[in-house]
Image: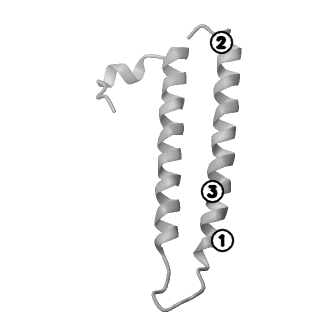
């Protein structure tokens, strides 16, 4: 992430800047959800044959897929609204 001066924060973001910021935030969210999924999948009592977290990991996979789909829709809509001027 790049450092910004206090004056940069007062400047309005251009559409390309907004789109890039949105892309970066979506990518961070996706990476975070993937990490949580891996961590949940590793949680299991060593003497247990049952793995209740498998269901949770599967649910998180569904959430990640839905988030990715929603992100794609948002990005496509943003580009369509801007008329492809990015």
Q: Mark 2 Cα within 10 Å, few/some/many (few <14, many 20+)? A: few
Q: Which mark is residue 55?
A: 1
Look at mark 2 in the image and give the residue it sits on.
82
Q: Quadrant of residue 3?
A: top left
Q: Circle 1 sits in a helix, a strand or a loop, which is it?
A: helix
Residue 36: give x, y in percent of width and height: 49, 60
Q: Residue at image x 46%, y 66%?
A: 39
Q: Residue at image x 54%, y 38%?
A: 26
In which quadrant will I find the C terminus? top right
- For the view shown, which residue lies furthest in the bottom direction? 47
Between label 2 and label 1, give the one nearer the viewer. Answer: 1
Q: Earlier in the sequence, mark 2 or mark 1?
A: 1
Q: Mark 3 Cα within 10 Å, few/some/many (few <14, many 20+)? A: some
Q: Is residue 53 above or below residue 62?
A: below
Q: Which mark is residue 6?
A: none
Residue 65: give x, y in percent of width and height: 66, 48
Between label 2 and label 3, give the one nearer the viewer. Answer: 3
Q: Earlier in the sequence, mark 2 or mark 3?
A: 3
Q: Residue at image x 41%, y 20%?
A: 10
Pointer 3 with pointer 1, Cβ within 8 A: no
Q: Is residue 10 above or below residue 83?
A: below
* Between 5 and 23, the one nearer to me in the picture: 23
Q: Circle 3 sits in a helix, a strand or a loop, which is it?
A: helix
Q: Earlier in the sequence, mark 3 or mark 1?
A: 1
Q: CA distance from mark 2 to mark 3?
A: 32 Å
Q: Which mark is residue 61?
A: 3
């Amino acid at each position: 992430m790049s450092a910004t001066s206090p004056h940069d924060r007062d400047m309005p973001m251009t559409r390309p800047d907004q789109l890039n910021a949105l892309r970066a935030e979506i990518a961070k969210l996706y990476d975070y959800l993937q990490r949580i999924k891996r961590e949940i999948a590793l949680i299991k009592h060593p003497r247990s044959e049952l793995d209740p977290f498998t269901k949770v990991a599967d649910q998180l996979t569904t959430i990640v897929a839905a988030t990715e789909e929603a992100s794609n829709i948002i990005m496509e809509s943003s580009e369509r609204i801007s008329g492809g001027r990015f």
